[in-house]
Image: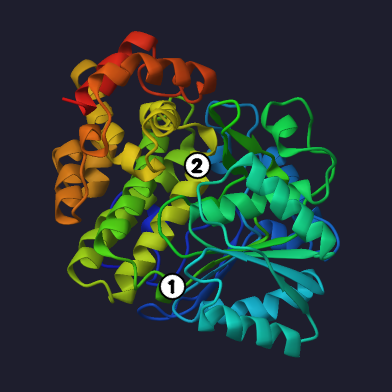
Amino acid sequence: MRSRASPRAYPAAAIPNGCTSTVLPGARRHPGIRGAGETTQRSRSCIMERCKSTRCHALSARASAQRMPCGPFRAGRASMEITSPGVVHCGAGTFGRIVEEVPRLGTRAGIVTGAHLVKSQRVADLYEDLRKRGVRVSISEPVTEEPTVERVDELAAFLREERCDVVISIGGGSVIDTAKAAAVMATNDGHTEAYQLKRREIATPPLPQIAVPTTAGTGSEATRVSVLTNNSLGIKRSISHPWMTPDIAILDPELTASLPLDLTTLTAMDAFSHAIESAVSRNANSYTRHIALAAVEQLSDGLPRCQANPRDLEARLACLQGSCFAGLAMQQGLGASHTLAPAVCIVGGIRHSEAIAALLIRSIGLIEQTLPGTYDEVKRAMRCEDVAKRLAGLCTAGGVSTDLAHYGLKASDCDAVIAAMNRYGSHRQTNPIEVTDNWARELFRACTK
């Protein structure tokens, strides 16, 4: 049974309801269960080698991806590196798989979550179920803000103090990004800022991780990156390493079914930005473009249905899968919305997804004016003639503003935004048009009219 978003050009989207796409070439696709039923995807790394005490399965994945001589990996590049979770569990009820997976990774689990979940019955039940399996469990203070280097240092100290040997992150992108970085810092010397500023390099594999997203937006459960704010320096930069990719990702639509309409839409815009910008990235290869377009299909199918019926678990799963696919796709660089978003967030004090919703739509319009045809494949994946207009319509349906002025930013903030952008400066070369200061000014002003 195929998903409602009937795939045409992109075989990665040609999957049964409830399945993930192929994570690495050579991965086994397990037969799907109808609707939002559970399926499991194990990557080549998992098939080749598993090890409780080290990240050797992730290293095997890196090596095999680099050696791969066939298929899409020939396309114009001598070598490439793909990282992905070792296992992805998809479907309603897969939250319960945590209890089965943790004992294979460690015996002392640290749970990291947000304020809305830390005292929930779901987390309390997980705590008891793990203890019954002989796992010692510690629950950290909740993550209540976007990831910061200070919060990562605090969480890493907690993990060391509790002698945790596996980290379970349950939450949105802020929770998962914080936990991923803390899992690294728990096993490496020094402070997070030194790694963010590239003064030190990650030398020791992080603690094993299980990532469980409760929003369909960042795709952090599938990436090797944590984006962190450094308030003392006024910057927002990432820490990245192949080892940082979670060992296990769990996509359970039951965890997203209670999200309000505006948050469902905002997080989906973040996922759309990863998918669309990956598809047209100047660094894109056949793997990332292919899976990015599959992500666009899943999100285009799932979001309108979530907006119409928040309890539609098939639609929720489509959005989670789209977000995860987009996380896999963004390894080759993003575009203009991600060049400016960190600066806009720092200057305006707004959320990443709020900045993205405005910047993505306007950047698509500006790029199409100069480079017609850039988004033709995206249009086919979305089944629309105007990508920017379609995204704007989804934002309107979700009660989300696409005007930065709505969040208090003004055209007069432009100089401060450009200055902050130049301190961060990522994805400027991978946008279809190089993001010069003048081009960035034009984009920002278009978002504040």
The x, y position of residue 402, in whole percent, is 21, 39
> Which one is in front, 29 or 107?
107
Q: Secondary structure at mark 1?
A: helix
Label 2 Cα crowd, 10 Å radius (few <14 / some 14-19 / many 20+) = many
Quarter residue 380 falls in:
top left
What residue sits 39% from the left and 43% below the top? 351
**Residues marked 1 and 2 touching at CB (< 8 Å):** no
Residue 331 drawn at (x, y percent):
54, 38
Q: Image point 29% across, 41% down: which residue?
A: 357
Query: Between residues 303 and 15, which one lies in front from this camera angle?
Result: 303
Q: Quadrant of the C terminus?
A: top left
Q: Amino acid at mark 2?
A: Tyr
Residue 82 in picture, x, y percent from top left: 62, 43
Query: Disc 1 or 2, which lies upstream in sequence?
Result: 1
Q: Nearer the viewer, residue 265 or 194?
A: 194
SS at mark 2 in the image: helix
* Identity of the residue furthest to the bottom in this view: 132
How busy is the neighbourhood of tag 1: few (under 14 within 10 Å), some, or many (20 plus)? many
Residue pointed to by mark 1: 255
Residue drawn at x 28%, y 62% as measured from the top left: 302
137 with respect to 219 (left or right): right
Horizontal side of 381 relative to 384 (left or right) equals right
Q: Is 409 rendered above or below residue 443?
A: below
The residue where tag 2 is placed is 287
Type of amino acid under label 1 = Leu
On residue 157, the disc is none
Using the rendered view, name the quadrant where residue 316 is placed.
bottom left
Say left or right for 426 vs 375: right
